[in-house]
Image (cartoon, rainbow, N blue to C red):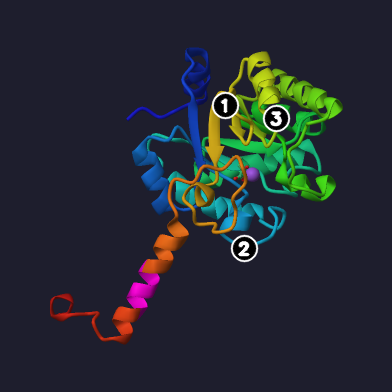
């Protein structure tokens, strides 16, 4: 099988083929996504929420991201694996950002990193890229800045923020980013970004005109029972399925139905 590369995803944009991306945090799920043919697997810092149970993405550490990423990389035969630089591992200065990116590449075998922000982090982006590490940008609702925003509402609905987003996306492209995630922005702004840029835009809550889509696996599989934002399409209701299976197991154990004759030595 031929590995998806930065060139593959950029060619997909040129050819009008949409890019598919999902998050994964462990070997077993990444294996299924890779077998299914997902183009890009993101080891997102959303692991902080869905794996560790934190309220925000801020607490997860670089060491914890490296643990998740190395598990995912072992499963990915075809998919391109991108890993989030977690909060606190790059904001200090571009040297620190490069060191964090190098640790991810060296200790996990991942194929690239993702970093939140535009102009503020452009030096770091350039430095990481000049070390030969592919960088994916992330603009719009960047969850590491949630306390600055104060809300998970749609971003860039006002003119000034929309213009800044377009400018930041151009800066990222000029710096050499190979793609950009756009999170929770109006569909028409997503369209404008996709048309303005040569590199692919991958949306989550950014409408249908961007070059690809990404969802958090727990959301699209319906493992997060209560999380139902407008942008989310749920492909399973796994919370209910797993709840039902667990109840059946408990019942079978209590009633001494499990194990039966054929299930014992
Ligand atoms: O951490 C994450 O899951 C992400 C996606 C929502 C893009 O950054
Ligand atoms: Na993230």
Q: Which residues are magenta?
A: 245-250
Q: Is residue 248 magenta?
A: yes
In the rendered structure, are the residues bearing label 2 and label 1 in contact, judged by CB atoms less than 8 Å apart?
A: no
For the residue pair 197 and 113, the one nearer the viewer reads as 197
Q: Secondary structure at mark 1?
A: loop
Residue position for label 1: 208
Q: Secondary structure at mark 3?
A: loop
Q: Quadrant of residue 126?
A: top right
Q: Is residue 173 magenta?
A: no
Count of residue discs: 3
Q: Residue at x 54, y 28 (%)?
A: 212
Residue position for label 2: 53
In the rendered structure, are the residues bearing label 3 and label 1 in contact, judged by CB atoms less than 8 Å apart?
A: no
Q: Residue at x 78, y 45 (%)?
A: 145
Q: Is mark 3 within 8 Å of ligand 1?
A: no
Residue position for label 3: 186
Q: Residues within 10 Å of mark 2 (few under 14, many from 20)?
A: few
Q: Residue at x 66, y 16 (%)?
A: 197
Q: Quadrant of residue 100?
A: top right
- Whether residue 112 is visible here, answered yes or no, is yes
Note whether 99 is above or below 68 in the view shown. above
Dominant SS type (magenta): helix
Q: State the image coordinates of residue 228 (x, y, percent, origin top left).
A: 59, 50
Left or right: residue 243 versus residue 170 is: left
Q: Quadrant of residue 104?
A: top right
- Whether residue 75 is visible here, answered yes or no, is no
**How far separated are the C-alphas under marks 2 and 3?**
29 Å
């Amino acid at each position: 099988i031929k590995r998806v590369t930065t060139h593959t995803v950029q060619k997909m944009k040129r050819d009008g083929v949409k890019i598919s991306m999902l998050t994964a945090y462990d070997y077993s799920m990444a294996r299924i996504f890779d077998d299914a043919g997902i183009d890009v697997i993101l080891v997102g810092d959303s692991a902080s929420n869905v794996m560790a149970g934190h309220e925000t993405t801020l607490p997860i550490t670089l060491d914890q991201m490296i643990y998740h990423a190395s598990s995912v990389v072992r499963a990915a035969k075809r998919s391109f694996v991108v890993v989030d630089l977690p909060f606190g591992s790059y904001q200090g200065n571009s040297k620190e950002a490069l060191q964090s990116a190098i640790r991810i590449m060296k200790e996990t075998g991942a194929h690239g990193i993702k970093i939140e922000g535009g102009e503020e982090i452009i030096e770091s982006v350039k430095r990481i890229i000049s070390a030969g590490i592919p960088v994916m940008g992330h603009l719009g609702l960047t969850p590491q800045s949630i306390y600055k925003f104060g809300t998970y509402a749609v971003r860039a609905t006002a003119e000034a923020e929309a213009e800044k987003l377009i400018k930041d996306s151009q800066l990222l492209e000029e710096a050499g980013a190979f793609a950009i995630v756009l999170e929770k922005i109006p569909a028409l702004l997503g369209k404008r970004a996709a048309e303005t840029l040569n590199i692919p835009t991958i949306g989550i809550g950014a409408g249908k005109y961007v070059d690809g889509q990404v969802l958090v696996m727990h959301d699209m599989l319906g493992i997060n029972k209560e999380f139902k934002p407008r942008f989310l399409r749920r492909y399973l209701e796994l919370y209910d399925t797993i709840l039902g299976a667990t109840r059946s197991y408990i019942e079978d154990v209590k009633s001494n139905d499990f194990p039966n004759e054929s299930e014992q030595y």
